[in-house]
Image (cartoon, rainbow, N blue to C red):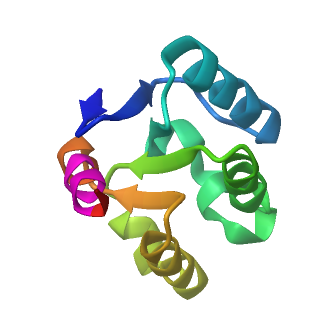
Amino acid sequence: MNVEGVRVYVSDARVQDDGDAVQLIADAHYGHQAEWVAVDAEQLGDDFFELRTGRAGAIAQKFVNYRMGLAVVGDIAEKLAGSKPLRDWVRESNRGRSLWFVTDLDALAERLQDRQ
């Protein structure tokens, strides 16, 4: 996917840990010359959204370290409703430049266009 010159690799890979994240980053960068990776929220698993597991932080940190954007795509309203810390983290992440939570790929495209 290419949005206003920004290459986005839309992945269907499951991301279970930070090792999977590094592999995904390498695939996106070297295989697709992408600046962003879009991953369906379901591919991250429920543990990603349980902040106490540390999984979300470890995965997100890999993307930050490798200067690759990560878009979590999908409806996570139910998960947000059950956790104030998750709501806070998602809100803060969406204010930043490296990790966004969006409902669909069209919403990601809009965000990428707005940052240009």
Could you say which quadrant of the image residue 114 lies in?
bottom left
Q: Residue at coordinates 64% horizontally, 35% vertically from top-left?
A: 15
Magenta: predominant secondary structure element? helix
Point out residue 21 in the picture as x, y percentages from the top left corner. Answer: 70, 36
Point out residue 70 in the picture as x, y percentages from the top left corner. Answer: 52, 48
In the image, 44 versus 32, the foreground residue is: 32
Could you say which quadrant of the image residue 48 lies in?
bottom right
User: Would residue 83 appear left or right of 108 to someone viewing this image?
Assistant: right
Point out residue 76 in the picture as x, y percentages from the top left corner. Answer: 38, 61
Q: How many marks?
A: 0
Is residue 49 covered in magenta? no
Residue segment shown in magenta: 109-114
Q: Residue at coordinates 27% horizontally, 58% vertically from top-left?
A: 111
Quadrant location of the C terminus in the rendered image: bottom left
User: Would residue 94 appear left or right of 89 to someone viewing this image?
Assistant: left
Quadrant location of the N terminus in the rendered image: top left
Q: Residue at coordinates 52% horizontally, 59% vertically from top-left?
A: 99
Point out residue 97 in the picture as x, y percentages from the top left corner. Answer: 49, 64
Is residue 111 covered in magenta? yes
Q: Residue at coordinates 18% horizontally, 46% vertically from top-left?
A: 106
